[in-house]
Image (cartoon, coloured by chain):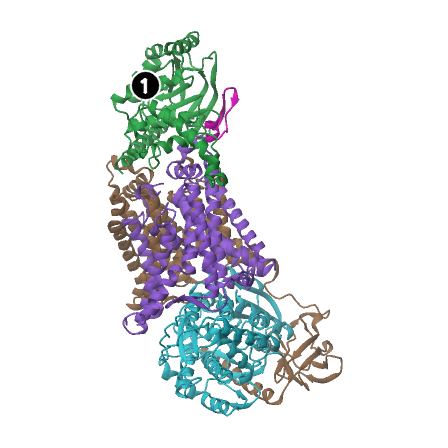
Chain colours: A brown, B green, C cyan, D purple
Amino acid sequence: MRRAVIAFTAFLGALFILLASPAWAEGESLRGTLQNQGQPVNGVKISVTSGDGQPVGEATSGADGKWEVQVPAAGSYKVTLDQATLPAGTVLKFKDRATLSVQVFEGNYRNVLFALASGDAAGVATPPDGGGSSAFWTRVAQLAFEGLSLGLIIALGALGISLIFGTTGLTNFAHGELLTVGAFIAFVLNSTFGLHLLIATPLAVIVAAGFGYGQERFFWGPLRNRKTGLVSMMIISIGVAMFLRYLLLFLFGGENVPYEQYVAQDGIKLGPVFTTPKSLIAMGIEIAVLIAVGLALTFTRLGKATRAVSDNPALAASSGINVDRIIRIVWAMGTAVAGLAGIMLGTTQILNFQMGQQVLLLMFAGVTLGGLGTAFGALVGSLVVGMFVQISTIWIPPELKTVGALAVLILVLLVRPQGILGRRERIG
Amino acid sequence: MHADTVNRKAEALAALASVPSEPGAPKPDPILVVDNVVRRFGGLTAVEVEHVEIQRGSITALIGPNGAGKTTFFNQLTGFDTADSGAWTFNGKPMNGVSAHQVARRGMVRTFQLTKALSKLTVMENMRLGAQKQRGENFFRALFSGLWQPQEDEITVRAEELLERFKLGAKRDDFAGSLSGGQRKLLEMARALMVGPELVMLDEPMAGVNPALTQSLLGHVKDLREQGMTVLFVEHDMDMVRDISDWVIVMAQGTVIAEGPPDTIMADARVIDAYLGAHHDAPLTTAEAEEQLHQAEAELEAEIEEKA
Amino acid sequence: MIRIAPFGRVLAVAAAASLALTACGGGEETASPASSAPAAPASSAPAAAAGDGVLTVGALLPQTGDLAFLGPPEFAGVKLAVKEINEAGGVLGKPVVEIDTDSGDTKTDIASQSVDKLLQQNTDVVIGAASSGVSKTVIDKITNAGVVHFSPANTSPEFTTYADKGLYFRTAPSDVLQGRVLGDLIVQDGSDTVAILNRQDSYGNGLADEVEKSVSGGGGEIVVKTAYDPAAADFSADVAKIKEANPKAIALIAFNETTKIIPELKKQGLGPDKVKIYFVDGNLADYSKDFPKGTLEGIKGTLPGAKAPDDFRQKLLSVDPALTDWSYAPESYDATVLSALAAEAAKSDAGTAVASKLIDVSKGGEKCTDFAACLALLKEGKDIDYDGLSGPVEFSDAGDPSEATIGIYQYDAENKYANITYLSGKVAG
Amino acid sequence: MDWTLIFSRAVEAGIGTEAVIYALAAIGLNIHFGYTGLLNFGQAGFLAVGAYGVATTVATLGLPFWLGIVIGLAAAVLFALLLGIPTLRLRADYLAIVTIAAAEIVRLVVRSVALQGTFGGTDGLEAFSDDFYGMNIYSPGQYGIGPIAFDHRTLWVLTVGWILVAAACAVVYLVMKSPWGRVLKAIREDEDAVRSLGKNVFSYKMQALVFGGVIGSLAGFLFALSRAATQPDLFSTELTFFAYTVLILGGAARVFGPVLGAVIFWCLLILVKTGMEEAVNHQVITFITVNQVGSINYMLVGLGLVLLLIYRPQGILGDKREIALDAR
């Protein structure tokens, strides 16, 4: 099959050259190919007049649908298709475009296209497939699906931000880079060591967890012990973010790079929505991880301890919980989940040293919307943000979709500063 | 201006003599009247005060066990927190919805349980900050020192007088952060006086102060009354109250459960129940637990601040 | 079209002359003749506008950023030209000095800093930038300093009419021509409903407008024309918008965002096997490492510039053995040679003087095709017409090439592109 | 290696347009963060508003330059008000997130496709600086001592810039020793205490935000005019973070902190950058390419910010006791 395609393409290319050369040599002409749904339409009369109405020439489309009229010089010409000569069942797609004004340039031929369609005797073309309101709803569905996909990734990142904030009070501006780092760890395993992405991913998540643990153990923890203020730590996190981001730029360059597997997969249709198998699998993994973390937070000893520390570190400490240990576990887990989010982002989109930074504000929006420091709020907030960002492009230009989310973030803080699920007294 | 000490106290006692010892009792000359103030956190009611009046020119103590909602109630009255419902008047003017700084400008000035002496400013700067209607606090006038310097000098003179009175004159140019806990309390009180208040609201003025200084602090509180001001102060230690207050209001679980002269209150069974009950019998409500937590946290923070 | 009247140019030269008089006297120039070593900045030498006897060519080309893939061939073109010029004896008897700087992209301030560095080092001609957007951000700075701004790759039609003080030139044709050729190609392939997805900058918008004009002029219909944010994290919304319009062909006017957009198109059922996709010079690159085999097969694209002759390619490889791509190398080479010839013709290396002769040496006179030959003719006092590797290079009065060649290419199963044909034409139809 | 080039570039950067722009941006931040304790992470937004105020007025609307300056200033005030209303009642971390978001909104809006006709999209605007350079008091040529030289245009920008820096420092000095400044410093430490003393904390924070924002917009004017172009992506969050590094390096809550910080920051940054580039070009360093020098530079800034905050949060001039770093 592929061979046939190549052959056909080569044939087309050859045809193109054959056709192009004479025009190149002979000077100016008007030409075109009449087709209806891929089938050539022959026997159709085309007449050409000069800009001031003088007849220049005529042609009739051949068996291959092609026609050509030589013109004496560059200039403006009127090209008319005689609708009476169209075969039965074939009409002009746009009835008012039987005559076209065409500019011919010096030394070049000029192609002219008459769009044809199947139609009844009245000449009304049957509507092309997939137009109108159904296309609109298809787009809404597509965007909602994209929103869910984005929201899940944001949620994975936001979970870490929220837990780290809850347990340590730190608003970590380097969290976006934790996504990027995770994605690039997997890239190294995948690309340099040649491991399949399905193997590289869990390994990368483990390495990311180690990175998070180490960061807390050797950096943030000691800083807290030095009684470094929270504002100070926030600015330090910015320094860390810059350092990590440009370290990745240094190591991997600024180009967009893909993983070895699952690049440019063909779309599959899922009801009204187009997606790729890898997106579905990624979403499945994301949902599974989110549910697992949610259950762990709710039911396991460790999860309960984490929430206790999040609620009140002093009280948790006094009731015998090892706060430092909990914080280290939270960092390890938060970084691991962020790394996973990065890998998923890299798989469904592409890897770039700025990929994490680009979603950082969306993660913050998700966390804030849900209420700083409440893990479940962060999940809900992130999904809302993801959906909102994508669906809003129906009304606002796509490049402003982030603006929409950020504006909503500010408005939410104005009316309900504690977020959707936050408690009122948490605000200073 | 300096009236006889005995006189002021006697006046206040005389005015309150005919007031019945029951929650919400009307006073002959109330400066502050509170009606149905309610504050809820989530589903928990932290404050639910039906009716309270504060007698002008008196020292009124607001006591209650930990978590009784005293500080929350204070916060409602001074605009630092928004009440869910209720109304209160100061000098007959409605005060609900009035923002914290407006409350202060109208003559109701408070201090805080955890002293908020601005430790990175000098003692004198702290004092000057309290003065009202400063011309130099306008951005454009601030650019021209000639426009505000004369007023600043007047303010400095007034501040120096107050500092002398509070025995802080020697510390004039020290950072407030270098003062001891008790001195900070004194500074905060002196600074509050710079505002020129009619009603001084002190949140646990004796908390965290070493016993030697307590008497001096109490003296200053009494002195406020002698200066013609009304004092409302929060305290959770009953014994501390007996000496200086003219009237005591008792809160427990967010409501006023008793009020009356100190001696009457000390003997009141409901009050003793409330104190003992809260500590020993009944399980803590979540609100109380939270209140306690807040206090624990606050104390911890204070400790950290001390060390820093 | 013609904005700079000859009178304006006379004024510019006069101004340059007066600058030479008013500028404070300078010390002796001590530029190092090494081809890529930067010259030591003159202490209080006259402004570049007055000329210091040494033609300093500053390359402001992408080493980083969206167009980094265009950088190597462009640098090689400039380097090769400088090498050949110096082998032929240099300009005004002295070797030409080349300074390489990075132009980055519009997301960074690199270009501005590089221009500062170049101006500081008495650059007379800035060769660059590749991206029209970057050129726009530095054009005022360069031209106000009396330095020639000479781009080998800017194609935005905006520059034709820009108030550039007669100092902006380019060897790449305005996108009027590329847009026309691409539009015609789309029409020829029989697509009556066409979507344009373009990068939102002066390059993308300019080319998109020209393609639209050409397609609708030829009877096709533009069903959706979407400009996207080049820095967007994902393009699903943009592609969904195109999907909604259900086009038969998509003109993708992009830089390296292509690596994100193509998978998204495929995902939403708009892959090259379903609709006809067209690339342009901004994204016509080798994607064999980026996509699995067959991903781009059948995609066509246009790229201004004639075929680089094989011996030219060999020479470029001698300058930079790592070259795999040749885009805009001839244009860069021609820009450098033209600048050198103009300086020789003007008998001055000053930017304004070079600018005043650039149009002259590009047309109307005895034809010559390399620096040595042209230099010999100039020394005989003859008027020359330099015909370069990128085409005949006849400058219009606005400093644009008035004739150019556009190549049409197609991707194979390896995701590499190969030429189908070349078309030549006049830019101003 | 061309040591003259390396050192002259470094010194030029230290007194050049970068230093001036960042000094002004950091003076604005100093008012926000240093004196008032407002963790404004959106200073880039103020620069953008200023730059685009003048650029749009002149280039798009064709109105006079001075009107552009007025509109730029007015836009900065308006931006401060819009930013302040929802955020000034919030905790520091919320404030940080919202201000960074607001600055990004400004950047995304001016670079948007939809408003390209007004703001020029991703390319930004140019052709608005002729009036400014028309006022140049220097005749064309190079001016300088030894290898350090600026052309007449840069020198004009620098003259205006350093006058603005001096003026801004003078105003900051005057207001910060007045009762107005006292209120700000008190707010930085404990706004509840200030409130209890009858001061309208919100109003003062707003005034500080507007004041610092206006100075930020001056930096924006210079940014646009010195480049004779505006590019939306130059006003990204990194600009703000560079300004923070400058401020903390020099010393927050000190009048000359931002100025000293800017001079040293740019001098060092360009010294390292040019030095590394030269080293790579002359094969002294062979394991990196010239293109990687830029990323190393940014890494060093990030690292520098971290180390400064850990080991010397008061910077060069500051007093550790006075900085609002332990606030919450």
Residue A390 in view, yes or no: no
- On the rendered image, what quadrant is the C terminus of chain D found in? top left
Task: Out of D163 and B86, give the one closest to the viewer.
Answer: D163
Image coordinates for residue B170, horizontal then vertical, percent: 30, 28
User: Position of D327 compared to D168: left or right?
Assistant: left
- Give the extent of the magenta segment: B83-105
Task: Out of C361 and D202, give the one closest to the viewer.
Answer: C361
- Check the image and name the residue furthest to the right: A53
**Residue at figure coordinates x 55%, y 80% from the top left:** C401
- On the rendered image, what quadrant is the N terminus of chain D found in? bottom left
- Identify the image quadrant of residue C105: bottom left
Residue assigned mark 1: B218
Q: Does the magenta stretch include residue A395?
A: no
Image coordinates for residue D61, horizontal then vertical, percent: 61, 58
Task: Out of D99 and C222, give the one closest to the viewer.
Answer: D99
- Identify the image quadrant of residue D321: top left
Q: Does the magenta stretch include residue B85?
A: yes
**Vertical position of residue A229 compared to residue A106: above or below:** above
Please state the chain letter of the residue tagged with numbered disc 1 in the rendered image: B
Image coordinates for residue B145, horizontal then vertical, percent: 45, 38
Task: Out of D157 and C98, give the one closest to the viewer.
Answer: D157
**Vertical position of residue A412 compared to residue D246: above or below:** above
Query: Callout 1: helix, strand or loop?
Result: helix
**Number of labelled discs?**
1
Image coordinates for residue B66, horizontal then vertical, percent: 33, 24
Question: 10 Å neighbourhood of mark 1: few (<14), some, or many (≥20)?
Answer: some
**Residue at figure coordinates x 65%, y 84% from the top left:** A68
Amino acid on which the number 1 mark rests in the picture: Leu
